[in-house]
Amino acid sequence: MQWSERRAARAVAAPRVVGIDDLRTLARRRLPRVVFDYIDGGAEGEVTMRGNRRAFEAVTFRPRHAVATATCGLQTTVLGMPLDLPLLLAPIGSSRLFWPQGEIVAARAANMAGTAYVLSTMSGCRLEDVKAATTCPAWYQLYLAGGRDAARAAIARAAAAGFSALVITIDTPVAGLRERDVRNGSTELLTRRPWAMLPYLPQVLARPRWLADFLSDGGLMTFPNVDIPGEGPMRYANVGEALGQAMVTWDDVRWIRDAWRGPIVVKGVLTGDDARRAMEEGAQAIVVSNHGGRQLDGVSPTLRALPEVAAAVNGRIDVLLDGGIWRGADIVKALCLGAQAVLVGRAYAYGLGAAGGVGVTRAIEILRTGLVRTLTLLGCPSVAALDRSYLEVPADWHVDRFDRGAPVSTAPPWT
Ligand SMILES: Cc1cc2nc3c(=O)[nH]c(=O)nc-3n(C[C@H](O)[C@H](O)[C@H](O)COP(=O)(O)O)c2cc1C
């Protein structure tokens, strides 16, 4: 480890950083407001974003005390791939704005933790370079930004580079309205027109350390994995506009399935109906996700949607969950309700924005130690042994209706 990295590692050690909230505070200090709010914000009133975390608070544990758990198994498999932890790093677009070479740095941290990294289409690093940074599984998340030809080229490159699964995000027919981004001038700052940019520049100039890193990394990135025929890599124009033209339909999923030989993961499922549809269209795994509350505000918290989806899937494919994972205890709750593993988004993005690779490693460490501690306090020997019996779920969640294998019926037993 270089001296600068050692210093950064000290900066994210306890007692300065004890939980994910502390990494968030450090990220807020280092990043310009427009970048921090891009990570931190949600759509419209941010009701779903807050709801994701509150749902974890609403569920309580039923521990088995005085049970010795000599071992604490954290290993799992997803899509048949062994992982040392039941958490993967979620696709986060524009990570290169948070830290130089952000996607490569995050993939390296995932590798050190023995887990998988999911690379967003909207990334600033070449997918080949990101894959080369890890020997653990890496998955490629596909948007149809730039059209089918650009997607076909990216799929071929991802296969050649060794990505082992393709993640298709289905909850972005348009970009959600993230009001903070509008207020911070995220569109104006990309115009390269000085008069339009001027009112929003002070927030950038107020973060000279970040600015120096950003300029040393080449300034505003392009999207090298969206190679548009005749045009080259997509420019960092308004990402929202690109997403608006990139809606994925089930028709597209069929087309993608023909273009990609490996497993397909559908991300953005919130109902049993969509879960069944995803299975019919050939998905080998699904992610119960509301995009971290960044798309349709007002949808269910993901933990609350999980039992219905898990019941519809009934063990036939892997179910993952993301949204609001802040603590190891959150991961345990998701696993008890039927997830095989979780994806973590903001929790590691704060670490990346705060301190680069050591920040991501610290975020993973916080979640890992929390996971071990929660399992031990619960009296459960491994993540594989978790089930509903370790939880008390609020009665109005009607989870019993969705228990795996049980018929989805509200009829009383005597009828
Ligand atoms: C800054 C940011 C950028 C994101 N970019 C993408 C993306 O490019 N593709 C995608 O499928 N999901 C994207 N997401 C959603 C995440 O993959 C994930 O679903 C979400 O962050 C999970 O919620 P959490 O942040 O509360 O953990 C993004 C999320 C954030 C916070």
Image (cartoon, helix red, strand yellow):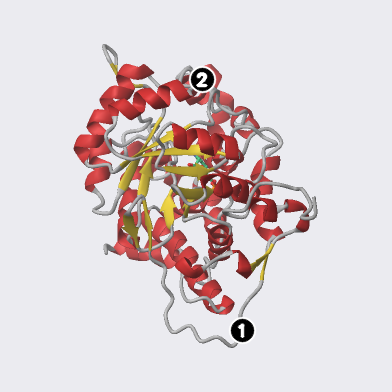
**Residue pointed to by mark 1:** 65
Q: Does residue 230 sit above or below 348 in this rendering?
A: above
Q: Residue at x 58, y 49 (%)?
A: 311
Q: Position of residue 153 (x, y in %)?
A: 26, 24
| Left or right of 261, for residue 219 | right
In this rendering, the answer to whether 315 lies above or below 266 is below
User: Label 1 crowding class (10 Å Cα cut-off): few <14, some 14-19, many 20+?
Assistant: few
What is the tally of numbered marks visible in this picture?
Answer: 2
Q: Nearer the viewer, mark 2 or mark 1?
A: 1
Inter-mark Cα distance, 2 to 1: 52 Å
Q: Tell whether 400 sits left or right of 157.
A: right
Classify residue 63 as left or right of residue 159: right
At x 51% / y 53%, what residue is drawn?
347
Name the residue nearer the viewer: 242 or 35.
242
Q: Amino acid at mark 1?
A: His
Q: Is mark 2 within 8 Å of ligand 1?
A: no
Q: Which residue is mark 2?
A: 244
Q: Earlier in the sequence, mark 2 or mark 1?
A: 1
Q: Is residue 47 left or right of residue 303?
A: right
Q: What is the crowding at mark 2: few (fewer than 14 residues within 10 Å), some, or many (at least 20)?
A: some
Give the vertical position of 391 relative to 55 (above or below): below
Is any atom of residue 247 visible in this view? yes
User: Which residue sits furthest front?
Assistant: 415
Instruction: Give the percent coordinates (x, y) of residue 181.
Output: 59, 31
Residue in front for this viewpoint, 99 or 120: 120
Whole-percent x, y for residue 345 in the image? 49, 48
Secondary structure beneath dot 2 equals helix
Q: Quadrant of the N terminus?
A: bottom left
Which amino acid, mark 2? Gly
Res 233 visible: no
